[in-house]
Amino acid sequence: MYKKSIEDPAGFWSDIALWEFYWKQKWGDHIYSENLDVNKGNIKIEWFKGGITNICYNCLDRNIDVGLGDKIALHWESNEPGFDAHLTYSQLLHRVCQLANYLKSIGVKKGDAVIVYLHMLLELPITMLACARIGAVHSLRVVANFPYIPDGKYRMLAKYSLT
């Protein structure tokens, strides 16, 4: 497996992508292309160009479809000893869909940017998956002392508040 990944990365990742992921639309002729030489134009790396999938669907729905709905999908541990939580695939999907539906109800849509500014809470991966589910791009900012909000347009800021 390792040898193939080094000698034929396109073939290796093509096999993984075909067998391990749902694709609404398969990618074009080439699995990837790259230009790492500034003398030959803009630097770019493209994988699965033209392919359409949904990583949230691949993470959750596919596991439920094969009978894993009652298995633990997410285990979260607090910095506080003894304070933890877990969600099954079915529970996680329910929470993700709730948040995705809320995001859509306030106007967040495919292609919008959402800044996620949360502590390492159980809601963090739920928010990231909800964004992925509706096709919104998320920018993750783990809480420090002060928020860093990048210049540019974003549709929503998801943040945690104690008040």
Image (tube, rainbow, N blue to C red):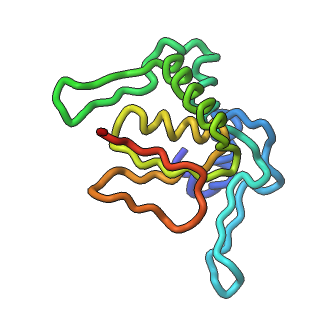
- Residue beneath the point at 52% across and 68% down: 151
- Residue beneath the point at 67% across and 87% down: 39
Examine the rendered structure and indicate whether residue 78 appears above or below residue 30.
above
Count of numbered circles in the view: 0
Q: Position of residue 42 (x, y in %)?
A: 68, 78
Q: Position of residue 155 (x, y in %)?
A: 60, 51
Examine the rendered structure and indicate whether residue 54 appears above or below residue 146.
above
Q: Position of residue 90 (x, y in %)?
A: 53, 17
With 24 as the anchor, is 94 left or right in this view?
left
Residue found at the far front of this picture: 163
- Residue beneath the point at 79% across and 51% down: 50
Residue found at the far right of this picture: 29
Examine the rendered structure and indicate whether residue 70 appears above or below residue 85.
above
Splitting the image into 4 quarters, where does residue 159 fall?
A: top left
- Comparing 69 with 107, the one in front is 107
Q: For the N terminus, give its image quadrant.
A: top right
- Comparing 98 with 51, the one in front is 98
Residue found at the far bottom of this picture: 39
- Comparing 3 with 32, the one in front is 32
Q: For the C terminus, give its image quadrant.
A: top left
- Comparing 103 with 16, the one in front is 103
- Residue beneath the point at 33% across and 30% down: 76
Examine the rendered structure and indicate whether residue 66 appears above or below residue 38.
above
Q: Position of residue 103 (x, y in %)?
A: 60, 37
With 61 as the anchor, is 49 left or right in this view?
right
